[in-house]
Amino acid sequence: MVRTVSGKARKKFLFQHPRGMHDILPKEQIWWEKIAKATKDVADSYNFLKIDTPTLEKADIFERTVGVETDIVSKEMYFIKSSSDRLVMRPENTAGIVRAYLEYGLSHMGQPLKLYYFGSFFRREQPQAGRLREFHQAGFEILGGNSDPIYDAQTILALYRLIEAAKIKTPSIQVNSVGCRVCRPHFRKKLVDYYRKYEKDLCSDCKRRLKTNPLRLLDCKNQSCVALKAGAPSLMDNLCVTCNNHFKSVLEYLDELSLVYVLNNYLVRGFDYYNRTVFEIFADGYEHAIASGGRYDYLAEMLGGRTTPGVGGAVGVERVLEVMRMRNIELALPLKSKVFFVYIGDLSKKKTLSVMEEFRRAGMHVQESFGKDSLKKQMQLADKGNARFALIMGQKEVYEESIIIRDLKSGVQESVPIKNAVEEVKKRMR
């Protein structure tokens, strides 16, 4: 947990930790270890692989992708003196992960590639509750393959499950679409036309944003600007057909998972590389978002690579721990057991998500491969992953509300009602 020392106690010492940063003392390590373990458990459960990137990155990476006009790049990056490179202490990790993906040719691995991380990041912000200059994030990224909206939903789901593993009940999801290169320029023009009428009422930052990065006008927290935002054009009303269909599918997947969400038409996030889905997750009674993220299909191209679909998000560890401290709660136990879900067709692909959650809630380690459409390839992956059972669902099973349980050791299979699937698998494991 993050602890503070009283002013009187601090005066006794000549040296103190830097402003906006903190020590993690021995008695607090158990909490950090539990969050790190919960992150690994959730990552393993959803088949994410660990990646660690350097604490230092070249400044150009963030200037190109996060955006020169964003507060992070223009005001908050910590520069490191170097004779040859302009280096900064990483302010976020998505750009660094995509850089590594391109640099090491990770597109040659199975696609999409699911990666996760747990590390510290640095921004020269004004220190306050929920905002530190050194902070930690646990994140999930899905790169490559195609822009299937099921991965947007699965990213949100992984973050949601990590928050649940911290026993933070019923976190609330806010979600929006910021469109793409086709529809966003049209919305941008509408937004500029609207705000020009009120330019004299904008804060100094928003007067600059109106000329350089109009979308960020919707992200301002200044009270006068917040009031103006209520009458601004809505992103949702200006999406192209492709973006509208993509976002509709994301919401359908969230509905299938019974994840409650709120549409926030003015949610844009602070990074230039986002397109289409963006989201934030909140805990009741806590001011700041404890998780956030979105889709970034153009980020690899910004770094000189080929256009590569991507979506990801991160949990703010200090914020999660602060909520846990406020509520005096602990973390959940890790998941066990292993089954592999196989789908045939789009209808069963959608249904599989909610069935998988029933098994995860029962403490079983479940696997899937949404990127593989053929039955043969999915069964091969089930064997390769040493799964004990394959749970197979096609269109027929969806309509009959059943699922096929195949014992991968004996080859024996049986069709059972979906509502009995968890107990039937448990029985066979015994």
Image (cartoon, rainbow, N blue to C red):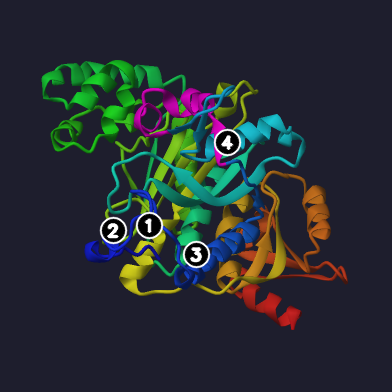
Q: Position of residue 73 (x, y in %)?
A: 41, 29
Viewer-closest of 6 and 365: 6
Question: Circle 4 is placed at which residue position?
Answer: 96
Label 1 Cα neighbours within 10 Å, binned few <14 / some 14-19 / many ≥20: many
Range shown magenta? 55-77
Quadrant of the frame with the N terminus: bottom left
**Residue 2 falls left or right of residue 136:** left
Circle nearer the viewer, 2 or 1: 1
Q: Which residue is mark 1?
A: 319
Residue 264 image point, x, y percent: 31, 42
Give SS at disc 4.
Answer: helix
Q: Which residue lies under the disc numbered 2? A: 286
Which residue is found at the position 41% from the left and 44% from the top?
A: 279
- Kindly check if marks 2 and 1 are in contact, taking CB atoms under 8 A apart as contact: yes
Q: Nearer the viewer, residue 424 or 60?
A: 60
- Residue 32, label in figure: 3
The residue drawn where x is 44% and y is 74% is: 330
Three-letter amino acid code at the position of disc 3: Trp
Asked where in the image residue 338 lies, by quadrant, the reply is bottom right
Return the x and y of residue 237 as percentages of the image width and height.
32, 29
| Residue nearest the viewer, comparing 306 with 380 | 306
Q: Earlier in the sequence, mark 3 or mark 4?
A: 3
Name the front one of labels 1 and 3.
3
Q: CA distance from mark 2 to mark 1?
A: 9 Å
> Which residue is drawn at the image coordinates 45% and 59% (left, top)?
258
Q: Is residue 228 left or right of residue 134?
A: left
Q: Amino acid at mark 1?
A: Arg
The disc at residue 386 is none
Q: Is residue 100 left or right of residue 158?
A: right
Report, in whole angstroms, how far the alpha carbon at label 3 lies from the one at label 2: 20 Å
